[in-house]
Image (tube, grey):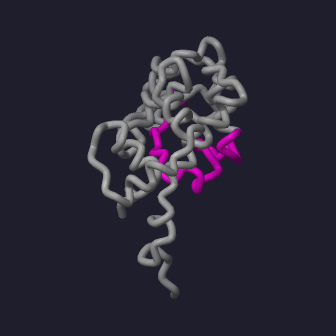
C-alpha cells in the first residue's frame, strides 16, 4: 500500500523541481500561504527543525531516537532490547504520512492531538543523557514556536493526509 497523493506530495515535487501534472498543478495552486509557511518551518533549522527525523517522500528516517519525552525513563525503549544504556529512551522514528489520522501520538500515546505534539517540541523537551543530538534546542526546552508558527506547522502537517489513500475501498477490512 502506497500513500502518495497528498497535498504534501505535490508540495514536495514542486519544491524539488519535479514536473507536475495538470491535476497536481491545481493542487499546488490550492496550497495556502499558511501551509507553505508551515512547510518552511518544518524544514528550517531555525524554525520547527523537524526534517532531521522526518524527511523525504516517506517523511521518516530509518533510526531510533530519543525525542525528549522524559528526563527519567519509565520505558527504556530500544535500551530494553539491546541492554545498551546508550539506547535508553530511544524509539523508532515513525512516518508522518497521514499523521492527522493516527492519534494518539508517541510510542505510549501520551499526546491526544497534534497541538499537544507541537507543544512538546516547542516547549516540552526533557533533557537526558541519550537525547538525540539533532534535537538542537533541547537545552531551551524546545524550538520555542509562537502561536502563529504553531498554527502554520499544524496546517502543514495536515497536508500529509492522503484522502484518496485513506478512503480507497480496496483497503477496507474484510467482513468475516
Left/right placement of residue 117 relative to residue 6 reads: right
Q: Position of residue 11 (x, y in %)?
A: 42, 44
- Determine if the magenta segment contains residue 55: no
Closer to us: 110 or 117: 117
Residue 123 drawn above or below residue 18: above
Q: Position of residue 89 (x, y in %)?
A: 54, 30
Q: Residue furthest top?
A: 139
Q: Residue at x 65, y 43 (%)?
A: 114
Residue 97 drawn above or below residue 93: below
**What span is colored magenta in the figure?**
88-115
Residue 138 drawn above or below residue 105: above
The quadrant holding residue 116 is top right
Q: Residue at x 70, y 24 (%)?
A: 146
Closer to us: 1 or 67: 1
- Determine if the magenta segment contains residue 101: yes
Left/right placement of residue 79 relative to residue 114 reads: left
Q: Is residue 99 visible?
A: yes
Q: Position of residue 167 (x, y in %)?
A: 51, 70
Q: Residue at x 48, y 82 (%)?
A: 174
Left/right placement of residue 49 relative to residue 139 reads: left
The quadrant holding residue 165 is bottom left
Q: Position of residue 98 (x, y in %)?
A: 51, 53
Main secondary structure found in the magenta portion:
loop
Quarter of the image that includes the N terminus: bottom left
Q: Residue at x 69, y 31 (%)?
A: 119
Amino acid at each position: 500500500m502506497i500513500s502518495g497523493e497528498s497535498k504534501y506530495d505535490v508540495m514536495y515535487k514542486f519544491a524539488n523541481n519535479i514536473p507536475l501534472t495538470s491535476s497536481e498543478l491545481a493542487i499546488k495552486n490550492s496550497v495556502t500561504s499558511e501551509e507553505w509557511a508551515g512547510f518552511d518551518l518544518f524544514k528550517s533549522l531555525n524554525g520547527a527543525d523537524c526534517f532531521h527525523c522526518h524527511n523525504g517522500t516517506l517523511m521518516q528516517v530509518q533510526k531510533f531516537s530519543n525525542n525528549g519525552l522524559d528526563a527519567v525513563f519509565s520505558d527504556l525503549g530500544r535500551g530494553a532490547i539491546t541492554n545498551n544504556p546508550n539506547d535508553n529512551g530511544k524509539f523508532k522514528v515513525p512516518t508522518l504520512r497521514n499523521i492527522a489520522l493516527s492519534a494518539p501520538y508517541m510510542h505510549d500515546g501520551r499526546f491526544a492531538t497534534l497541538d499537544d505534539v507541537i507543544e512538546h517540541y516547542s516547549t516540552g523537551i526533557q533533557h537526558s543523557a541519550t537525547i538525540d543530538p539533532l534535537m538542537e534546542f533541547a537545552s531551551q526546552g524546545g524550538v520555542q514556536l509562537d502561536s502563529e508558527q504553531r498554527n502554520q506547522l499544524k496546517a502543514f502537517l495536515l497536508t500529509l493526509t492522503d484522502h484518496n489513500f485513506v478512503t480507497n475501498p480496496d483497503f477496507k477490512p474484510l467482513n468475516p
